Image: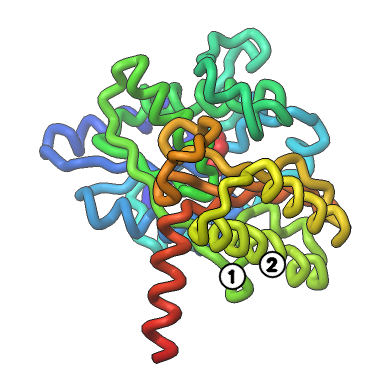
């Protein structure tokens, strides 16, 4: 695996691959690599000849400076894991390579509408930072496709919308969320949890499953389901930002006529030092329940 920090080195390696007609896929990360990232790389490997990954803790997408400062940075271990996973090229630029004028003075990308709700409402400027860095990285790497985790579902939709609106010729692939045994979605932010909190955090997945079950059973009182789940989280010591049932397609408020299969349950909640986000498309819950039932029989 080649590791480069400068744009010129990145471009000359990529040009050589392009001349050889190699198809390049891209997995952008902020490092602190875990199994969730490795599953994205696995997905990329199935679809291309060469895999480029990046590690860049992007200051523009942090809404609180102390969150940026404390974000886990584990470069040597990350490098080893990415190499073992078969990544061909790792781009690890310093901030001044990406934002030579400082990120506050850089041109940015705003995706309207979809960024106003959920995490966008709770983390002002976050999705501007995400859209800007993803756009810049796409311009630098120019991959055929890029893989993003479905765990950050709103981020995935923001990236899809940006690519569509700006005619960026990159195919966006969503990869399923990797979970711990107890259902907790894998995330670098889980590092902020104590062992006890990691166990407690399983409540998020449990509540999403219970809510999905109720929607499948015919409940259409979405607001009541949301309020109940938030109350359970709060009573257990979480500080929920949102617990929402929305349409999968555009994160709109569902109507009584919306088919359950086209809905998704989305959650963000603070626990101890961590802000955890997760989501469960109802059709995924159905598939999960069916596979559990067939294993049990
Ligand atoms: O999901 C992430 O790790 C980041 O938001 C991303 C897409 C790498 C942009 O910094």
| SS for callout 1 | loop
Disc with the residue nearer the chain's start (2 vs 1): 1
Look at the numbered discs 2 and 1 and tell me whether their residues touch, using CB distance below 8 Å. Answer: yes
Q: Quadrant of residue 213?
A: bottom right
Q: Nearer the viewer, residue 256 or 61?
A: 256
Mark 2: few/some/many CA within 10 Å (<14, 14-19, 20+)? some
Tell me the residue that label 1 is attached to. 180
- Along the viewing direction, whichever of 39 and 240 lies nearer the viewer: 240
Please, is residue 167 above or below residue 257 in the view? above
| Disc on res. 201 | none
User: Separation of disc 2 and disc 1 at Cα?
Assistant: 9 Å
Number of other residues with Cα within 10 Å of mark 1, as a class: few under 14, some 14 to 19, many 20 or more: few
Q: Work out whether 278 lies above or below 200.
A: above
Q: Report ligand 1 position as a quadrant.
A: top right
160 over 219 or under it: above or below: above
Residue 149 in the figure: left or right of residue 25: right
Residue 55 can be seen, yes or no: no
Q: Position of residue 235 (x, y in %)?
A: 88, 58
- Residue shown at 57% from the left, 47% from the top: 220
Q: Identify the residue at image location x=67%, y=13%.
A: 104
Instruction: Name the element at disc 2.
Output: helix
- Quadrant of image for the C terminus: bottom left
- Answer with left or right where residue 49 lies relative to residue 154: left
The numbered disc on residue 202 is: 2
Picture coordinates of residue 74, whole percent (x, y): 64, 54
């Amino acid at each position: 695996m080649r590791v480069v920090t400068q744009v010129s080195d990145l471009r000359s390696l990529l040009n050589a691959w392009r001349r050889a007609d190699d198809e390049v896929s891209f997995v952008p990360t902020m490092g602190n690599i875990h199994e969730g990232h490795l599953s994205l790389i696995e997905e990329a490997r199935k679809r291309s000849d060469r895999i480029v990954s990046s590690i860049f803790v992007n200051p523009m997408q942090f809404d609180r400076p102390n969150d940026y400062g404390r974000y886990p940075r584990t470069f040597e271990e990350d490098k080893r894991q990415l190499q073992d996973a078969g990544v061909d090229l790792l781009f690890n630029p310093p901030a001044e390579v990406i934002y030579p004028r400082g990120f506050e003075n850089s041109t940015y990308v705003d995706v309207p509408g979809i960024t106003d709700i959920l995490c966008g409402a709770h983390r002002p400027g976050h999705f501007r930072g995400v859209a800007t860095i993803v756009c810049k990285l796409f311009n630098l790497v120019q991959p055929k496709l890029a893989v993003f985790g479905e765990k950050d579902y709103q981020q995935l939709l923001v990236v899809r919308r940006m690519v569509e609106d700006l005619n960026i010729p990159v195919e966006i692939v969503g990869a399923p969320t990797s979970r711990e045994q107890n259902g907790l979605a894998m995330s670098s932010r889980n590092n902020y949890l104590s062992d006890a909190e990691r166990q407690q955090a399983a409540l998020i997945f449990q509540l999403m499953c219970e809510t999905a079950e109720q929607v499948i059973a015919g409940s259409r009182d979405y607001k009541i389901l949301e309020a109940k789940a938030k109350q359970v989280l709060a009573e257990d010591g979480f500080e929920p930002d949102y617990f929402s049932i929305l349409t999968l397609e555009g994160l709109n408020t569902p109507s009584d006529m919306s088919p359950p299969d086209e809905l998704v349950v989305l959650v963000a909640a603070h626990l101890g030092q961590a802000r955890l986000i997760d989501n469960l498309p109802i059709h995924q819950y159905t598939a999960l329940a069916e596979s559990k039932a067939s294993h049990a029989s």
